[in-house]
DNA sequence: CGGTCAATCGTCTGAATGGATGATTTTGCC
DNA sequence: GGCAAAATCATCCATTCAGACGATTGACCG
């Protein structure tokens, strides 16, 4: 039986590469592509593929958000995350938002087809690098509140406690409290490592 | 006349995509690809393309370094930087290391061919996004010394002045001096913004 | 209603940072 | 050899940070 495959990626060259790889492949039915989240959802209104290859970084929406939306509206559609580089927190997010697998863009043709077959059959597929990095780092992104995220942004922009307090119309001790809960939640011993984690975790 | 094109990129899908786009294009002679810097240099020993499409992130070497090497050994070869996302400091590095242009991987087929024609003719090509970001941000990466880079790494890892001093067998005032010259060179008012710039600038 | 948690405000304190300024010793380079 | 830059060390001082406490308010939820 033939798997219907759709791709959502704003990188034209990637789309073209995958199309070229898959279009003459028996067992794969190429449905087309979307360059952003909106067109992807538009497409899904009329047709549902078996598998969507989905980029992490889309122009109008985060891949993780789109992933969640799609899985809510069309639970039977399997999603395979696609990304250029190995980014643990994002992989984690994708999987927890319903993706069935994750693939790096330097994967071979065989790996790509394997992955599609696996997730179309209801299984899971993680490329070696992703699996490796999920094992090694237990660095789960902590759950922070809306206010804390605000403070985190300002800290990353180099604002001090007094400046944050002034900007948000709160007292200095309050700003300090938020800063300290951020440090505690991230397990960081100072702003330096906090900022590094935040930037690398894509929170900024 | 036909332009000889070679590509160096470790992302199989990209290579495949570009090959698919270019192989039937009149005026383009597809020479093949290399997945890393070493094979690229190996290939150049026997044949020289007119244009090399070169990824920024290679497994064995930085694209910028390879760029420099190639331009030193084969000045007549034109290099076109290729990358997924828009990263000002890297673009700057590529250009100052001899690249003739820069292209994002979401470029269209027309843009790709235009770019190849331009640089093959000895001209320059910058994709709109890259040109834009080079104009907007004057945030040139400051020149820092080897020692300062060392300190910068430790700061980003969350080490304090006393810890850095102990680790590098230098006195606390010295560690502090290095930290302060980093802040001065980056124009950062505290570690938070320093770390952010360093991480975003790809120095970590 | 009672429990939990986010968000706010507070005090106290030692440690670390950031700014100013100057000096000495290597080291690299012409 | 001699210059310039890098790397080292130093003192002084105000500000800021980070840890350890505690406390109140309001919102949401079972």
Image: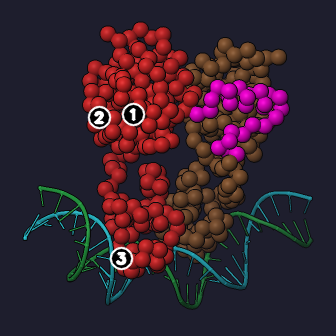
Chain colours: A brown, B red, C green, D cyan
Q: Which residue sits at x=47%, y=16%?
A: B22
Instruction: Answer whether residue A158 is visible to the viewer in this image.
Output: no
Instruction: Tell me the residue at 40%/80% (across/down).
Output: B172
Residue A107 spot, x, y in % from top left: 62, 32
Pointers 2 and 1 in contact (C-beta within 8 Å): yes
Q: Position of residue A51 (x, y in %)?
A: 75, 27
Q: CA distance from mark 3 to mark 1?
A: 42 Å
Disc 3 + disc 2, Cβ < 8 Å: no
Q: Nearer the viewer, residue A180 or B140?
A: B140
The question of residue B48 being in magenta is answered with: no
Cα separation between marks 3 and 2: 41 Å
Quarter of the figure with residue A2: top right
Is residue A128 magenta-colored? yes
Q: Earlier in the sequence, mark 2 or mark 1?
A: 1
The numbered disc on residue B16 is none
Q: The numbered mark 1 sits on a residue in which chain?
A: B
Query: In which image quadrant can residue A102 be found?
Result: top right
Write the start and end of the magenta stretch as one range.
Answer: A106-131
Give the labeled residue for mark 3: B174
Dot 2: what SS? helix
Q: Earlier in the sequence, mark 3 or mark 1?
A: 1
Q: Which residue is mark 1?
A: B41
**Badge 3 vs badge 1, beta-carbon distance below 8 Å:** no
| Badge 3: chain ID | B
């Amino acid at each position: 039986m033939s798997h219907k495959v759709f791709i959502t990626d704003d990188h034209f060259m990637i789309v073209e590469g995958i199309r070229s790889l898959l279009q003459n492949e028996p067992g794969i039915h190429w449905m087309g592509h979307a360059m952003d989240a909106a067109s992807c959802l538009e497409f899904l209104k009329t047709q549902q593929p078996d598998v969507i290859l989905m980029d992490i970084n889309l122009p109008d929406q985060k891949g993780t958000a789109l992933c969640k939306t799609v899985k809510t509206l069309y639970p039977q559609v399997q999603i395979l995350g696609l990304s250029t580089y190995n980014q643990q927190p994002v992989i984690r997010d994708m999987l927890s938002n319903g993706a069935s697998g994750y693939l790096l863009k330097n994967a071979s043709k065989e790996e790509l087809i394997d992955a599609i077959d696996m997730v179309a059959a209801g299984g899971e597929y993680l490329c070696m690098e992703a699996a490796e990095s999920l094992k090694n780092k237990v660095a789960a992104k902590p759950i922070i509140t809306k206010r804390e995220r605000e403070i985190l942004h300002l800290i990353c922009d180099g604002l001090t406690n007094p400046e944050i307090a002034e900007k948000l119309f709160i007292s200095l001790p309050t700003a300090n409290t938020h800063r300290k809960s951020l440090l505690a939640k991230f397990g960081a011993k100072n702003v330096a490592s906090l900022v590094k984690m935040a930037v690398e975790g894509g929170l900024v």
